[in-house]
Image (cartoon, helix red, strand yellow):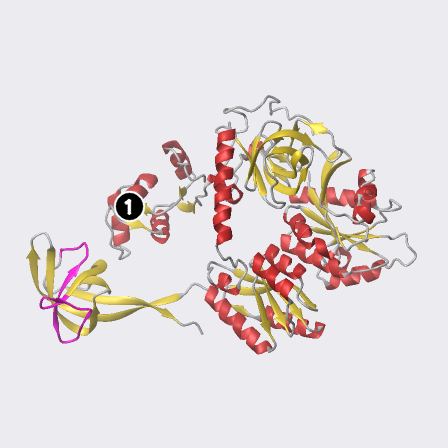
Amino acid sequence: MGTNKNYSNKKPNNKSQHFQNKKKGSLISNVNNHKMNKQDIKNKLNDGVLVYSGPLTVTELSEKLGVSAVDIVRSLFLEKIMVNVNTTLNDDYIELVALKFGYEVQKEKIVALENFEEMEINDDPTMLVERPPVVTIMGHVDHGKTTLLDAIRKSRVVAGEFGGITQHIGAYQTTVKGNKITFIDTPGHEAFTEMRARGAKITDIVIIVVAADDGVKPQTIEAVNHAKAAHVPIIVAVNKMDKPAANYDRVVQQMSDLGLMPEEWGGSTIYRKISAKVGTGLDELLETILLVAEMENLKANPNRYALGTIVEAKLDKQRGPIATFLVQNGTLRIGDCVVAGTCFGKVRQLRDDFGRQLSEAGPSSPIEVSGLQDVPTAGDKFMAFENEKMAREIAAKRKEAKILSERKVTSANTLESFIATSGEHQEINVIIRADVQGSAEAVKNALEKLKVEDVSVNVIASYAGAITESDVLLAKTSNAIIYGFNVRPDSIVRRKALEEGVDIRLHNIIYNLLEEMTAAMKGMLKPIYKEVVTGQAEVRQTFKVGKVGVIAGCYVTLGVIKSNATVRLIRAGIVVYEGKLSSLKRFKDDVKEVKEGFECGMMIDGYNDIKELDIIEGYEMQEVERK
């Protein structure tokens, strides 16, 4: 936790090094009031990339590309797309034009500053340095997780825990051969599933501790599921190898059945034999952690304001609100103004896991912070800001947004929410609970075989037994839905699912379950449309009416012309314009449609260059049903 030579120990001011990133790399990408200057645009275009953040008019696009607006109109005309200099182009048209002029496109997402957890941080690569790995220790109760951490830290963490069982998330840092490693100890008891889920979200590496004399237990399976959902490397530490009843091969077989195939069997999961009590195998385990961390190439920028995650928080009677922060990027310093969740504060004290007071904490540091005005929620994000006014305003906006969101009925992890999304390859995460293991496996295999174009099912957990609160918390963590087959949740679980916005689907016939999932997968696909010509009309005569425009006197020669139709004007077999009808009349009356064999008067919205013998063709886009 030494002082960074590029980071002044002085109290940061409005021009602090935290925010002096114009030459060193940007602090935040995509703040809603951020605009690229002309030199930025020129540099981007020199790289052959057009960067934009929303719809552009033809004129705006021409300025960004440095080409004539006339050339853009002409290029789109050749694609039978009729526009003028004031036409607003959608993403597809912008990409089409950019590609024609030799540029790739990159659309930036606009994010308000108060939603800082959604921002993409683009640091200058030259400012990045290696950071310590964040390692989460998981496993079943009494399998030796905290004892292992105690042995690594050479302290007595276990002695301070009630009954020898960890009752809160502890974050600690230790040094191994000159390299720091941050450890997060998560409780193993079933009641602490939610804490364990938070641990998996903020980790770089997961160590799953399994007692060699006890084997895989329910919370071991849950820990594996959380680790998989976090998509991080997993190391299995087979503990208590000093005991006579230790059976390493049985543990390996049981964990392999959960999808953690050891390297010696051709898999990718690293297994290590240890005894946390005796102290054997620890050096090899720590070296493995450092090796995996080196392969992960973990880096951060210490020369910027800190951001990270709240590991735990409490109200101390003497010191007030206290929170454990895990700094994930930047450096947190005494005097920094921070927003933690919806809380605001100015850092008064920083203490490490041994209670020592520090002046700053760099990337991957677990640090106890005092100075917040309220107690934040564990699992929320925090970020330091340039000054107190900015931090206070952002905290107020976040609190207001949270109050508004809590008033709404949310259902984040429902089958309908998956259907409402569209994109490229997608997965529906599913947790399966069935009355017996055979049924659970049958449902799992059937769901995994389903595939509708670019949508597939990912079963992250499948086991026998009633649906539990742990299942709901895992579903929330991994954005999954729960399928119950011949089982029913009790009122407590139902209430928990409602609170967390998790969808529970119940079935007792597998075919109904598969039909429902197939329909949902089809609903996630982008709809397919085909053009259907509804009718054609020949222009027999034109009438210019003052400022109103040109009225085309027409005779419908095919099908029907509808008042709400999209039309194209065809002259000598060439499409010269596409748009919408602004008026459709029979004599002096407005009508909804005119059928074949009847005369009518038409006006095309925004277009008056209509000539006799032109053909006005009406068409509509109809969705094609997928088979």
Determine whether 86 is above or below 220 in the image: above
Which residue lies under the disc numbered 1?
Answer: 58
Q: Position of residue 16 (x, y in %)?
A: 53, 25
Q: What is the three-letter code of the residue carrying label 1?
A: Val
* Above or below, 349 relative to 581: above
Residue 129 is situated, as x and y percent measured from the top left of the image, at 62, 34
| Residue that protrudes farthest toward the right in the picture | 244
Closer to the camera, 316 or 615? 316
> Relative to the observer, which residue lies in front, 227 or 503?
503
Residue 85 screen position, x and y as percent: 24, 46
**Occupied quadrant, residue 318:** top right
Q: Is any atom of residue 261 visible in this view?
A: no
Task: Give the quadrant of the C terminus.
Answer: bottom left
Q: What residue lies at 32% left-to-right and 43% top-to-bottom?
A: 61
Nearest to the observer: residue 522 or residue 374:
374
Q: In this rendered view, identify the residue nearer to me: 315 or 11.
A: 315
**Left or right: where 443 falls relative to 355:** left
Residue at (35% x, 47% y) in the render: 55
Q: Image point 84% across, 56% down: which residue? A: 212
Q: Which quadrant holds residue 596? A: bottom left
**Left or right of 177 in this view: 362:** left
Q: How many marks overall?
A: 1
Query: Relative to 564, is 206 above or below?
Result: above
Q: For the magenta stretch, what is the residue range? A: 585-609
Q: Is residue 450 magenta?
A: no
Q: Secondary structure at mark 1?
A: helix
